[in-house]
Amino acid sequence: MNTPKTICITGATSGIGWATAQRLAKDGHRLLLCGRRQERLQTLEQDLSCPVHTLQFDVRDKKDVFAAITQLPKAWQQIDVLINNAGNAHGLDPVQSADLDDWDAMIDSNVKGLMYVTKAFLPHFLEQKHGQIINLGSIAGQEVYPNGSVYCASKFAVDAFTKGLRMDLNKHGIRVGAIHPGLVETEFSLVRFKGDTSRADKVYADISALQADDVAQAIAFMIDAPAHVTVADLTLLPTDQASSMVINRRE
């Protein structure tokens, strides 16, 4: 077991963020949990047997992000790991008929929000000259699929930002990497299809999709790697998935 760390997780109120908090709590880390839904943050805090501090904000709101992070209690200002997990998908439509509000929601959360949180924490990382940043990418940031142009673009941007950030922080001793999951059975598709359970269920039908716990375990692996090792890119697929479009559905 490595030395316990102080770890910040954005988007902690559901899915991969929630599962990662559960896993890292078992490993004895201190957790700074961020999310939009205060009641879920409180529920998660009560469920964890580790030191926890919560921050309620929407990563899309630049002012709230910087205010929340700059006003952290002193005991929580020095974090060892930042996990940029918050993000979403909205709609699955061709460019010509897509809703512009869906585009804004994805770009604002997946790209700008991730950048805001990273920028807000960078002074702490630079001062301590160590730490780790893990960004939640996607196989959609490696392969474009039909009707997913803007979501894919947002995840391609995460990949590019991660690589550039790793270069910029290299001389400061800060590890930077990204994890790129394939199909993970969470609220992801329910959000994408705006609560349409029939469409969401079809995404995971007849396959053994990844579960949020699988991704959490992989994130823990990235954190536990020795300090001289950076897991720069980790792609995680269910065995039933070979690429974004090649899926073995056992009908």
Image: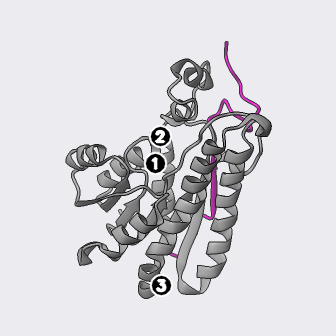
Q: Is residue 125 left or right of residue 24?
A: right
Residue 81 occupies which quadrant of the picture?
bottom left
- In the rendered view, tell whether residue 71 sits above or below residue 41: below
Q: Indicate the position of residue 126 as horizontal and vertical percent values.
A: 47, 84
Residue 167 in sight here? yes
Q: Are marks 2 and 1 in contact (CB under 8 Å)?
A: yes
Instruction: Please report whichever mark, 3 or 2, sits nearer to the chain's N-terminal start.
Output: 3
Mark 2 — residue?
212
Residue 248 occupies which quadrant of the picture?
top right
- In the rendered view, tell whether residue 44 sits above or below residue 65: above
Q: Is residue 127 magenta?
A: no
Q: How far separated are the C-alphas under marks 2 and 1?
A: 6 Å
Q: Which residue is drawn at the image coordinates 21% and 51% (left, top)? A: 49
Residue 226 in sight here? no
Q: How far separated are the C-alphas under marks 3 and 2?
A: 31 Å
Q: SS of the residue at dot 1? A: helix
Mark 3 — residue?
126
Q: Indicate the position of residue 203 as horizontal and vertical percent values.
A: 61, 26
Q: Is residue 243 magenta?
A: yes
Count of number-bearing discs: 3
- In the rendered view, tell whether residue 167 sits above or below residue 233: below
Mark 1 — residue?
216
Q: Amino acid at mark 1?
A: Ala
Q: Which range is magenta?
A: 227-251
Q: SS of the residue at dot 3? A: helix
Q: Is residue 196 left or right of residue 55?
A: right
Quadrant of the rendering where the N terminus is positioned:
bottom left
